[in-house]
Amino acid sequence: MEYKISELVARTNVPKSTILYYIRKGLLPEAKKLKSNVHRYNDEHIELIGYIKYMQEEIGSTNEQIKFALQHKNQSLSSSFSMIEPLMNTLSAVARDAVHYTKKEFLKYCNVDSTLLEQLLDDGLLVPINDDDFTEKEASVIRLILSFKEVGVEYAIIKEYVKHAKALSQLESQMQMQLCNVRSDQNFPMLWKIMFETLFNAKEYLFNRYTYKVLLKSLKDEIIR
């Protein structure tokens, strides 16, 4: 579908001057020129503008970094805004309407001392999306940790849980790199399907099934005894 510059501005909520700036800087392709003063843009421009805004506002990328990523998009799974945004939002598990707290506000909200909070941050049990940005997700983890301590579960086993979560994230990163190595414009949608299916289907299936197997064995062992 083709759009006038005014339509592109309305659809992306980005000023005309900024769009033209992106084109001059090589972040966006040139518009299709019908006449000397008649230009048309397409869905690729809308997709790329969304990607540029997301990388600037959420990731903190510079124009040069974004340009480099787009020039090497066949080595990256991150160059599609329509795919990277929902993936990152789902992984962050932070609702769009979530209440956000600074660290100072969060300490008051959870009624915990700063020493405990810093310990949980250092040990990787709390992983806020940004350093000074806490939500109910972090509060729920603190309540869980306090419950563990209340019933006498050793803190070391909780730290071990974190250790395996970090190791899994590294494996998933290696998987992404291998997918990038075989990426082409033709198989790109399939690679994203593989990544989503792995993160949100296979991971849950494998982890829950192995937990099921272990618990089942424990129940059988209890009966035998």
Image: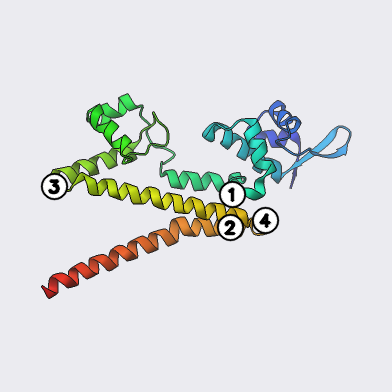
Q: Toward the viewer: 91 or 119?
A: 119
- CA neighbours of label 4 inside 10 A, class few (<14), some (14 to 19), many (20+): some
Q: Is 61 on the left-hand or right-hand side of 129? A: right
Pointer 2: what residue?
191
**Which residue of the protein is positioned furthest toward the left in this rendering?**
225
Residue 112, image x, y percentages: 22, 30
Give how far across and how far down residue 29 sits, in percent.
75, 39
In the foreground, 176 or 135: 176
Task: Name the quadrant containing residue 46.
Answer: top right
Dot 3 falls on a residue whose secondary structure is: helix
Q: In the rendered image, which residue does mark 1 sit on?
A: 77
Cα gap from disc 2 to disc 4, whole angstroms: 9 Å
Find numbered disc 4 in the image and state the secondary structure of the residue it sits on.
loop
Residue bearing mark 3:
151
Question: Along the line of sight, which residue is nearer the eye, 184 or 15?
Answer: 184
Q: Which residue is mark 4?
A: 184
Q: Are marks 3 and 2 in contact (CB under 8 Å)?
A: no
Residue 11 in sight from this viewpoint: no
> At x 69% / y 28%, what residue is drawn?
18
Lower sequence index among marks 3 and 2: 3
